[in-house]
Image (cartoon, helix red, strand yellow):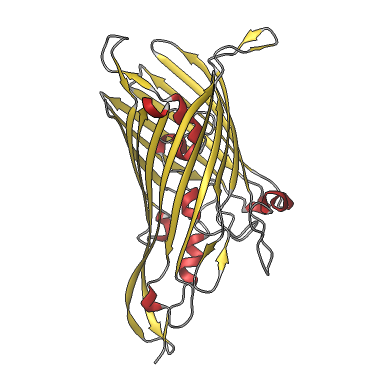
Amino acid sequence: MKRKINLKGIALLLLFFAGSSGLFAQAGGASVLFISIPPDARASGMGEVGTAIADDINAIYWNPAGLGFQRYVQKGFDPEDVVPYRQISLSFSKWLPQFNADLYYSYGTVGQFFEALDGTLAFNFIFMHLGEFTRTDMNGNPLGKFRSNEFAVGLSYGTEVARDLAIGVQLRYIQSNLAPASALAGGDAGIGRTASFDLGVLWKPKKLEVFGYDIGDIFSIGLNLQNVGPKITYRKESDPIPTTLRIGTAFNILKDEYNDLKFALDIAKLLVYRTQLSSDPVPKSFITAWRNPGVELSFGAEYWYEKLIALRAGYFTEPSALGNRKYWNFGAGLRYDIFRLDFSFINTIEENHPLANTMRFTLLIDWK
């Protein structure tokens, strides 16, 4: 008797995983979309922006160049009492709650500035639990249950290469466990592995005059080329990973003793091109992907009062050719001593959308 596992249900769930990059059916057909899910509640609450902000340890996702500006932090009240930057971030989200399918997303990262390296080194781990499935034989008789998951492990480094300019890189190992090896006698793809890298640049000028106005220390602009790597290979097929080009800008328009207000804008383009018969590898897809119409656009704002309480809001949109996802994001943050707790919530425009009511929680610790 042959054993067979049907992975169609898993594939359908993958259509919605990426939150801000899930173009599986419309314009690319990428796999392991979980690595494109924005991990932290802070940036998610701002509409999923962060390429030009990247001012905490979660820069490892938005723009690893942001790590280059994280060098020393003040430990006490004395400005001269500084220690190397060190931070931890932990995030959790029950994914696609509308499905009630036991899906959840977990993310953790830790980083520290090393004077000997003249930069900040960070490690992160992503885990996506895809739920429980039933293995059946050729006649549909159940043979047992198994759980599916995907995970990625990454190492990042960021450093300043010139005044106000930083670069960063991340190397990542990715594994997709859609089905255990014992369930693959029927020939379905089940376990895939690949690797990727990110490359980011961030410019935060201290002085910059535009039409007679000095916008230095207010304006920043960043670029991040994410998830560049070979296709992920399963038993009988290979699929592209979600290589994405992100460009963002941010304005810190108000900052004083009590108030801190910033606005940010991100544009993202999925650099994957796929036909019914095949998909283009990198770097060819860097060119052919522009045949796919449109880009993702997100913008948002964050307001801090006395560095204690934060309110956030933002909007994400994409053209109908890419899936027509449109939703508002709302969030809040609370800081106490070395801890910061962030929360975000997705309010979709479309009723009964799989992402509706998705919440993220992030705990950030300044390990001084």
Is residue 301 shown above or below 30?
Answer: above
Q: Residue 112 vs residue 15: left or right?
A: left
Q: Which residue is located at x 58 percent, y 11 percent?
A: 207
Q: Residue 15 vs residue 154: left or right?
A: right
Residue most toward the right? 291
Is residue 136 shown above or below 18?
Answer: below
Q: Looking at the picture, tell me which residue is in the foreground, 9 or 52.
A: 52
Residue most toward the front? 116
Quadrant containing the C terminus in the rendered view: top left
Q: In the picture, residue 277 is in which quadrant? A: bottom right
Q: Which residue is located at x 56 percent, y 66 percent?
A: 238
Q: Residue 93 vs residue 17: left or right?
A: left
Is residue 132 shown above or below 74?
Answer: below
Residue 352 in view, yes or no: no
Residue 240's x, y, as percent?
58, 59
Quadrant containing the N terminus in the rendered view: bottom left
Residue 52's x, y, as percent?
54, 29
Q: In the picture, residue 273 is in which quadrant? A: bottom right
Q: Which residue is located at x 56 percent, y 60 percent?
A: 231
Q: In the picture, residue 245 is in which quadrant? A: top right
Q: Looking at the picture, tell me which residue is in the foreground, 28 or 15.
A: 28
Q: Looking at the picture, tell me which residue is in the foreground, 211 or 318.
A: 211
- Count of numbered circles in the view: 0
Residue 307 in view, yes or no: yes
Residue most toward the top? 212
Residue 168's x, y, as percent?
50, 34
Q: Which residue is located at x 44 percent, y 62 percent?
A: 176
